[in-house]
Image (cartoon, helix red, strand yellow):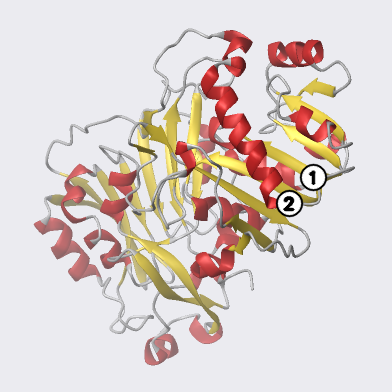
């Protein structure tokens, strides 16, 4: 996707499987959709298919943090609110509605999300939040003025289906009218018990930005070729990475290893030195050509981890993915492809967004050989990566308690949505395994992000 093609930003709250927005994103690459759905088992079915449909596995409500989530017998009826017993009894077709599971999910305010993502204007906000629709709208705060169109579900019955639900038609109309919106359309549904209302902003929404791309750390558009891998900064961070791997003491010797995003092979040589059988993959032919010149004994080929099945290259004890994920516009697709080639352990290092919430920012990058192939990279939060890994069946995920000796790793978490601090990016190492690991320097991610594990225990 060319970073100049995004013309509209859509936010889908209560996306479920993207029934209302996925096909729109599929048919129009100029629309970027951020799809919020608290149940990752549902929304992750769509993750990684389109680079302009980004799954956000969390709830939008009036506070940032975590909240109890009531999973319905029909996943489309799951809500932050429990069912209203009398309301369900009077609801046509409500006989089978019940809560089958209660979990905790991460939550975020809409204005917090928009500020994190540097989104200046939202062209369409669709809200179908099963009773908490008004809370979603209120969570936009003053940023609701930056929304052009809102499509929101309301109930028409005397009693709500959800306890605490405040999304009656009149309440929502009054609120949005007060905010400067005009009701333009209404579509009845669910046997006439609900309506989807369409509102437009009567004011001018100029938008501080037409898209959600933030700037990466390189501004030059001229490629430095493969020489970029041998510059002082690159060599320093590679040394810190490999010293850190040694310190962790993982069982790496003699394993089969897939090095995804291998560049010119400098890190693959580390595994070759441990007697590993290494397969190197990179999307740039120039990088692979230089790798074969520098390390003629390494197996290497051109491959795109976002678009190709890594399983075609075999099953590997270790999948090594350092310095790649954040150079991709579609990390969910990459993790899915890498997971299917991973027999035991996935070693992952990435630049991150400083947020406990599972969010991901897109950034522009230069044309250098160690940067994004498409010109668009990403900065996922740690919890976003955890959610993707859990969705791919990794039940054992760890964050090292010691970090590499390099300034990029030495930041203190502030939960402020930034991906750049004090002149440096922020990096984290994440280790996922098919089997439990007992290394004392590894912290179980479920102890750090318990709210992410609600659906995977």
Q: What element carries label 1?
A: strand
Hey, which quadrant is residue 421 in on the image?
A: top left
Depth check: give the residue in front, 440 or 177: 440
Q: Locate residue 344, reporting x and y percent.
A: 81, 53
Whether residue 383 sits left or right of residue 117 in the image: it is: right
Q: Is mark 2 on a helix, strand or loop?
A: loop
The quadrant the C terminus occupies is bottom right
Mark-to-mark CA distance, 2 and 1: 14 Å
Hey, which quadrant is residue 295 in on the image?
A: top right
Q: Locate residue 126, reporting x and y percent.
A: 36, 52
Residue wearing tag 1:
318
Residue wearing tag 2:
249
Residue 146 shows in the view: yes
Q: Residue at x 53, y 77 (%)?
A: 72
The image shows residue 95, relative to residue 446, as above or below, that is: below
What's the mark number on residue 409?
Answer: none
Q: Which residue is drawn at 67% across and 37% down?
A: 242
The image shows residue 44, relative to residue 242, as above or below, that is: below
Label 1 neighbour load within 10 Å: few <14, some 14-19, many 20+: many
Q: Residue at x 53, y 84 (%)?
A: 98
Q: Which of marks 2 and 1 is nearer the N terminus?
A: 2
């Amino acid at each position: 996707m060319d970073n100049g093609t995004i013309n509209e930003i859509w936010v889908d709250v209560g996306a479920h499987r993207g029934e209302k927005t996925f096909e729109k994103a599929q048919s129009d690459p100029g629309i970027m959709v951020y799809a919020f759905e608290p149940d990752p088992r549902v929304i992750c079915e769509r993750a990684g298919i389109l680079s302009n449909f980004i799954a956000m596995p969390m709830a939008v409500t009036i506070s940032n943090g975590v909240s109890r989530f009531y999973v319905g017998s029909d996943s489309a009826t799951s809500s932050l609110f429990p069912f209203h017993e009398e309301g369900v009894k009077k609801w046509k077709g409500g006989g089978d509605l019940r809560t089958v599971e209660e979990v905790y999910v991460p939550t975020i305010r809409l204005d917090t999300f928009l500020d994190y993502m540097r989104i200046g204007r939202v062209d369409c906000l669709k809200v179908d939040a099963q009773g908490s629709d008004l809370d979603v709208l209120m969570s936009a705060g003053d940023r609701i003025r930056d929304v052009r169109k809102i499509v929101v579900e309301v109930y028409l019955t005397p009693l709500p289906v959800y306890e605490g639900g405040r999304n009656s038609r009149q309440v929502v109309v009054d609120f949005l009218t007060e905010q400067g919106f005009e009701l333009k359309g209404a579509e009845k549904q669910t046997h006439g018990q609900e309506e989807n209302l369409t509102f437009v902003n009567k004011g001018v929404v100029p938008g501080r930005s037409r898209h959600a791309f933030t700037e990466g750390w390189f501004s030059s558009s001229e490629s430095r070729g493969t020489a970029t891998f041998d510059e002082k900064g690159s060599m320093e961070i590679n040394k810190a990475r490999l010293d850190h791997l040694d310190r962790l003491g993982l069982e790496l010797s003699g394993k089969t290893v897939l090095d995804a995003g291998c560049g010119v092979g400098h890190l693959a040589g580390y595994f070759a030195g441990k007697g590993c059988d290494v397969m190197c993959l990179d999307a740039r032919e120039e990088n692979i050509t230089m790798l074969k010149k520098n390390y003629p004994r390494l197996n290497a080929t051109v491959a795109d981890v976002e678009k190709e099945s890594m399983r075609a290259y075999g099953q590997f004890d270790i999948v090594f993915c350092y310095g790649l994920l954040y150079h991709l516009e579609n990390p969910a697709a990459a993790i899915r492809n890498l997971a299917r080639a991973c027999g035991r352990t996935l070693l992952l290092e990435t630049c991150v967004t400083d947020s406990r919430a599972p969010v991901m920012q897109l950034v522009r990058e230069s044309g250098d050989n160690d940067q994004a192939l498409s010109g668009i990279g990403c900065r996922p939060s740690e919890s976003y990566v955890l959610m993707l890994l859990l969705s791919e069946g990794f039940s054992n995920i760890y964050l090292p308690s010691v970090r590499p000796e390099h300034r990029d790793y030495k930041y203190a978490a502030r939960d402020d949505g930034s991906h750049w601090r004090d002149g440096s990016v922020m990096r984290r190492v994440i280790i996922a395994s098919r089997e439990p690991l007992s290394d004392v320097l590894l912290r179980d991610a479920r102890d750090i992000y318990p709210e992410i594990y609600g659906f995977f225990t």
